[in-house]
Amino acid sequence: MTKAFIFLGPPGCGKGTQTELLAKELKLPHIDTGSLLRKNIKEGTNIGLIAKGFIDKGQLVPLNVVSTVIKNRLKEADCSFGYILDGFPRSLEQALSLDNILDELNGNIKKEDIEAIYFDIPNEVLVERLVNRRSCPKCGKIYNLLTNAPKNEGKCDDCNVDLIQRKDDTKETAMLRFETYEKETKPLLEFYTNRGNLKKINADQSINAVWNDLLKTIKIKETV
Ligand code: AMP
């Protein structure tokens, strides 16, 4: 199977959790631009220095920066037979840039192999999800204090290290991120619908129910 999955949906819709699961199930790399950018910030790279100001304001990092990050990642050998993109593309110009990158790389994955999955969820539940989100700085596992709490308060179930809250998971920055999503990312739904490769999932359900729907939607059992 040669496949590139992209996941679309507002901040807090649960795509991070599901893309992690799917990556393990399909044994494909999970490429999350938000995490890649945060890693650059932590390491103090030039990319990180540019990205920080935009992330803190809930805005999209400029196209040339994210496209460079993605292109470099997609060139790596583990991406030859597929990958799961989480958080990219996030605007029409990024979707077109992804097409160009795939043309340029001229590898196994072509733009026709892209399958877009949209996580549909009402806005009302999202702020609550975001402000209660915590993650493990070591393994990246995502928790929610209300719906998916760690077994020991404040500690990762797997690594036992202290969980962290992302700086942009405050109510104020979350509102700015929703605005950015509405303006920049939502038009992608029409873009991929017109190409005939957008599938929709009801993301306002438990993690298990969304996972089951995801497996059915991408007919994973027949394709793996
Ligand atoms: P996320 O972890 O996906 O919620 O992303 C956190 C932040 O990283 C976003 O609010 C943006 O500032 C930035 N970011 C992540 N992915 C992208 C992208 N594809 N394009 C531009 N900025 C991005």
Image (tube, helix red, strand yellow):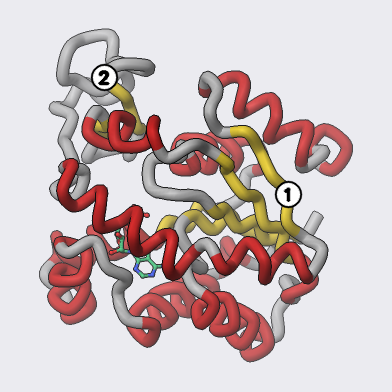
Q: Quadrant of ligand 1?
A: bottom left
Q: Nearer the viewer, residue 64 or 27?
A: 64
Report the amino acid beneath label 1.
Lys
**Disc with the residue nearer the chain's start (2 vs 1):** 2
Q: At 63% across and 90% down in the image, what residue appears?
A: 104
Question: How far apart in space, not on screen, are marks 2 and 1 (Cα)?
Answer: 29 Å
Q: On the rendered image, what quadrant is the C terminus found in? A: top right
Report the amino acid beneath label 2.
Leu
The percent position of residue 144, horizontal first and vertical second, equals 31, 24
Q: Crowding near pointer 1: few (<14 within 10 Å), some, many (20+)?
A: some
Q: On the rendered image, what quadrant is the N terminus found in? A: bottom right
The percent position of residue 191, horizontal first and vertical second, equals 67, 71
Residue 145: mark in rendering: 2
Q: At 39% across and 30% down in the image, what residue appears?
A: 125
Identify the secondary structure beneath mark 2: loop
Furthest residue in direction top, as rendered: 151
User: Dot 1 corresponds to which residue?
Assistant: 199
Q: At 70% across and 79% down in the image, what residue appears?
A: 107
On screen, residue 195 versus residue 7, left or right, reads right
The percent position of residue 78, horizontal first and vertical second, equals 57, 61
Q: Nearer the viewer, residue 202 or 101?
A: 202
The percent position of residue 156, horizontal first and vertical second, equals 25, 23
